[in-house]
Amino acid sequence: MTTRPRRPLRHGLPVALAATLLPASTLTGCGVFGSPDLVIYNAQHEQLLDEIVPIFEEESGLDVELRNGKDLEMANQIVEEGKDSPADVFLTENSPAMSIVDNAGLFAELPASSYATIPDQYVPDDKTWTGFLARSTVAMYNTDSMTEADMPASLMDFAKPEWKGRVAFSPTGADFQAIVSAVLAIEGEDATAAWLKGLKDNGVIVQNNLVVMQSVDSGEVDAGIAYSYYWYRDRQENGSDSDSSALHFFGNQDPGAFLSISGAGMLASSEHKDAAEEFITWLTGTEAQQAMAESYALEYPLNPEAKLNPEVKPFDELQPPTVDVSSLNGPQVTDLMTEAGLL
Amino acid sequence: MTGRRTPPLLLAAGAAVALLALVPLAYVGTYVVVIGPVDLWHLVARPRIAELLRNTITLAAACMAATAVLGVALAFLVERTDLPGRRYWHGLLVAPLAVPAFVNGYAWVSLDRSVHGFAGAFGVVTLSYYPLVYLPVVAMLRRLDPALEESAWSLGHSRVRTFRSVVLPQLRPALLGGALLVGLHLLAEFGALSLLRFPTFTTAIYDQYGSTFNGAAATAMAGVLVLLCLVLLLADLRLRGDRRYARVGRGAARSVVPLSLGSWRAPALGALVVVVVLALGVPAYSLVKWLVVGTSTQFPVDDLTRALVATVVLALAGAVVTTLAAVPVVWLAVRHRGWASTLIERSTYVANALPGIVVGLALVVASLRLVPAVYQTATLLVAAYAILFLPRAVVTVRAGLEQAPAVLDDVAHSLGVGPLATARRVTLPLIAPSLGAGAALVFLAISTELTATLMLSPIGTRTLATEFWAASSELRYGAAAPYALLLVLVSIPATVLLMRTDGPAAQTQEVPA
């Protein structure tokens, strides 16, 4: 008879009990859960903010905390949190999420200096937030099975039966939902609902735009709907997911040429408004805009002073449709997509 | 035994745990009422729901069956045959627990894009979850009284018939508990199924929440998911029945004479190699490959260290809190059976069928409305972990307590020992291994928990799992790899503890209950 196998547990239990007391001191003590000078709810790509926020911290001496999530998830979370929200600044990939927070009256009006470098059409009339980056809608196509001539003239054509099983898209992404909001603003509710139904029948549904690109490049589908920068990023990195594909820009003010705006806003409930203003002013300033232009991101900076890699299709050749950035209706889009069975 | 009076404090403790566990359900229930029957019907009776229902049920049924067969077969091979290197095989077979399902999904998808849809999801999820059946079955096999099997043989039963009629029935609590966990877990799985492009209710709810935060459609889907969970619970309740599996004595006296595999040795070894290669080899190879090959690979040591510290601290706190919370629940369910005890035990299971994001959101809403002070604190996150992982602790601790006969308590009482001293001197030593196993399981689960952590982690707190997810969902496989490897390293101590907890004990007295 032996009790040897039990011995570790005899010691293990007191150790485990002691461990309950450890976190309370550790959580506050070792800085892992410290208190920051500025809290940013970030729905833009985490990697981009991880690149530029340290520059801001260095210059301002402020300690910034990033809480990362997705556009609509975070917008709705801010609405749910209301005036208790710990967020000082909200950054999105697309403007419909900004509208949700704006419509709830939770943004503070920005001082003119914080969006001075941004062209007027990318700032809503009530000046509650400002655009800081733009992304162009695009169709990707597989160059082994398709040529530029095979691509449709309009994004709306992907709902036609000849595209059955041939087009990939990510309906759960805020990017695609922003594109739908543009279609809704341009084509109206009935046309949008019919288009979504066609896409549900035709489309290969994947989880995000990167997988859209992969699916196109591998030949699993002939074409995909996404933003252009994904393809350019892959080209810049190693081309493994873009070497058998190309971009088709719709132009002609087609909904498929929609230019989506990334927004930055300051919460009215913020207790760090000076820091929040300082950050947004910095974000739209030439230095940060140039840093973002030179980063891996390859999204379009909105400050005309910043120069993007020349391999990316120039901003002034995009021919986007005219859409009021502050009027895109996110909730109606999710309703229509739920109705179409895409969500 | 059942007639013993239930101590009010114990009942209060159990009820408090059950109430906490029911917060997410109350959230869903309240919302369903608020939506109203007409809108609810509109949201539920649509083709998308039928599609999700079909996907979810097929996948859950297939995975539960596969993990049950795989779990019992592997446990039998390792515990009851003369397989060479049984101890090492045991370690290798438990090890996949340290590889989260979503890491496994990433490993397969990043190597071969054709792994997706039902087949991909079925394969990857089965390989990730079979240890949930394997482990409790092994623990039970080790504790079975060999005298029963020997009696069967002496009465002329073959090994096969003995296994079927004597061993298998005794394995039932472990097997059913494990398969139930697999089913419930699958209902809540998000990461792997999202990567493998197989939509179920949970991924659909996640998508809806991502788009609408707490919209009606998501809550309606969560309602259907809860119903699916209740079906599993009722099935378990029926199958488990009211049997007792008590045994006297600490651990099995002797090992059963191992079954000689003979000419089956090579195929058996081959099968084990296949399982280990698929469940462990592929993720390991994939991670190492991306670590080495990935062009985006960096080693941001500071970020890695921060994420590691946050993960370990949260997982330790959560494991201890959850296991302690499981004790009154199990004690009531095993020692004071009755409707109240059953209700309390079942309550703790429900949350496991809700995706982490629903639990997360429920706690966000509840904390903001009821106790704003805990919002955005580690306390709230640990509470979410306790809700999410109580079922694991309860199943494991319960299996242990069922083996500790209540008659020993009566003996202690008759010798004048008070109830607390009895618990400490008699019962606790008997259930200590299962407490350890329960805490280890919870530690593993928390260190790889994703969705509730994303929702509830205090600002700035990033865990290994959330950092991994951020990178892998952007297909930065190389950048994700160091986090995944750290996740595995963090889980190794708990996995080793699991392997030792029920180590073959050598005791002599055996009195079948």
Image (cartoon, grey):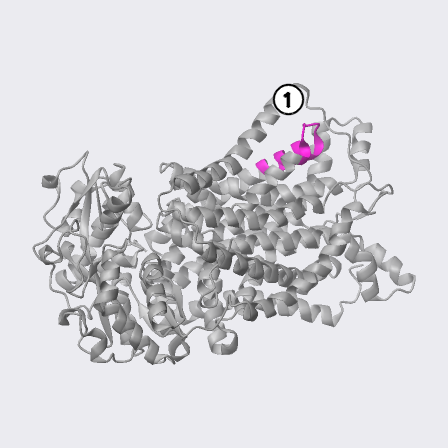
Q: How many numbered circles are shown?
A: 1
> Magenta stretch containing residue B73, yes or no?
yes
The reply to whether residue B49 is visible in this rendering is yes
Give the residue displayed 56% in from the left and 45% down from the top: B97
Q: Report the span colored magenta.
A: B70-87
- Type of amino acid under label 1: Trp
| Residue that sits furthest to the right in the current view | B415
Q: Is residue B146 magenta?
A: no
Majority secondary structure in the magenta region: helix
Task: Residue B79 in the image: state x and y as whole percent.
Answer: 69, 35
The residue that appears at 26% across and 68% down in the rendered structure is A283
Relative to residue B75, is residue B466 depicted above or below? below
B205 over A132 or under it: above or below: above
Q: Residue at x 91, y 65 (%)?
A: B416
Is residue B56 visible to us here? Answer: no
Provide residue B113's location: percent of width, then percent of height.
35, 38
Dot 1 crowding, Cα within 10 Å, few <14, some 14–19, many 20+: few
Q: Is residue B439 left or right of residue B257?
A: left
Relative vertical location of residue B149 with respect to residue A56 in this rendering, above or below? above
Q: Quadrant of the C terminus of chain A?
A: bottom left
Q: Position of residue B476 (x, y in %)?
A: 36, 48
Residue located farthest toward the top when viewing the structure as drawn: B263
Which chain does the residue under circle 1 lie in?
A: B
The residue lying at 22 percent from left, 58 percent from top is A293
- Where's residue A113, x and y in %? 21, 78
The residue singled out by tag 1 in the image is: B264
Out of B170 and B370, give the one closest to the viewer.
Answer: B370
| Horizontal relation, residue B2 to residue B326: left or right | right
Which of B485 and B34 lies nearest the eye of the viewer?
A: B485
Left/right placement of residue B323 relative to residue B468 reads right
Residue extending furthest left?
Answer: A252
The picture quadrant where one finds residue A1 is top right
